[in-house]
Amino acid sequence: MSLHFDSLPPLSLYIHIPWCIKKCPYCDFNSHALESVGQALPEQQYLNVLFQDLDNDLFYVQGRKLHSIFFGGGTPSLLSAAALEKILSYVEAKIGFESGIEITLEANPGTFEYQKFADFKVAGINRLSIGVQSFDNQHLKKLGRVHQQQEAIAAAQAARQLGLNFNLDLMHGLPDQSPEQALNDLNIAIELEPDHLSWYQLTIEANTVYYSDPPLL
């Protein structure tokens, strides 16, 4: 079977990192909480499996180079910069990158360290998608998030200082959230001048804590 290159869309790659510090009650993604804070990830074992998975799908590249890569999860910012660099080096060697490729890493403000963000940039990350969800500490607690307002603001400011393109993820329709509180979250996000802002409604998904014990939205 062969495909015509002219008819194919630009090539993008999604890379899933399944670990997180804590499973949020609304999350239905394939993510798994660490047994303890600071637990070492089996990075090289996972990289080996990722590389095999990529090799199995190389047929679908069809001569194209990548124009974007997105690391999602889970919490990809739990990975070391060295592991990210290994992944990007392998992918570039196998497929190749378009000039100006966008490489995004989802980041949890609860795992924020300025030096770690700087190391991610050196590894090849040029865009961060920061999972803020809310700037209200009470709402963050109800959502099971491991960060507070100030950490979210600091993460956004660090991304800007490092010259990284960044997105802020916000949610609205939260338990016990008023429209005024939702708009306050939005105004704080706008003041941080992200390059992109996603603002989406909390939905109750199957196989989540919120599904078995639904809050009033």
Image: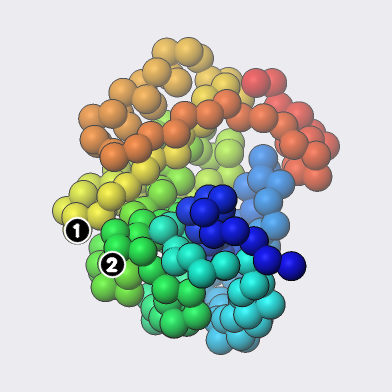
Mark found first going from the N terminus, 2 or 1: 2
Name the image quarter holding residue 124: bottom left
**Left or right: where does residue 115 sit relative to residue 72?**
left
The structure residue drawn at horizontal position 57% and vertical position 22%, both measured from the top left corner, is: 173
Say which of 196 and 213 sits in front. Answer: 196
Residue 127: % across, % down: 34, 54
Q: Is residue 53 above or below residue 174?
A: below
The 10 Å Cα crowd at callout 1, few under 14, some 14 to 19, many 20 or more, is few
Q: Is residue 213 visible?
A: yes
Residue 129: % across, % down: 41, 49
**Left or right: where does residue 131 sit relative to residue 25?**
left
Q: How far apart are marks 2 and 1 (CA)?
A: 8 Å
Point out the residue furthest to the top here: 179
The 10 Å Cα crowd at callout 2, few under 14, some 14 to 19, many 20 or more, is many
Residue 67: % across, % down: 41, 58
What kind of residue is marked 2? Lys
Name the image quarter holding residue 196: top left
Say which of 207 and 88 sits in front. Answer: 88
Q: Disc number at residue 121?
A: 2
Q: Disc number at residue 162?
A: 1
Say which of 180 and 117 sits in front. Answer: 117
Q: Can residue 120 be seen in this view?
A: no
The structure residue drawn at horizontal position 53% and vertical position 40%, both measured from the top left corner, is: 141
What kind of residue is marked 1? Leu
The structure residue drawn at horizontal position 54% and vertical position 59%, both measured from the top left corner, is: 5
Q: Is mark 2 on a helix, strand or loop?
A: helix
Q: Are marks 2 and 1 in contact (CB under 8 Å)?
A: yes
Q: Disc number at residue 17?
A: none
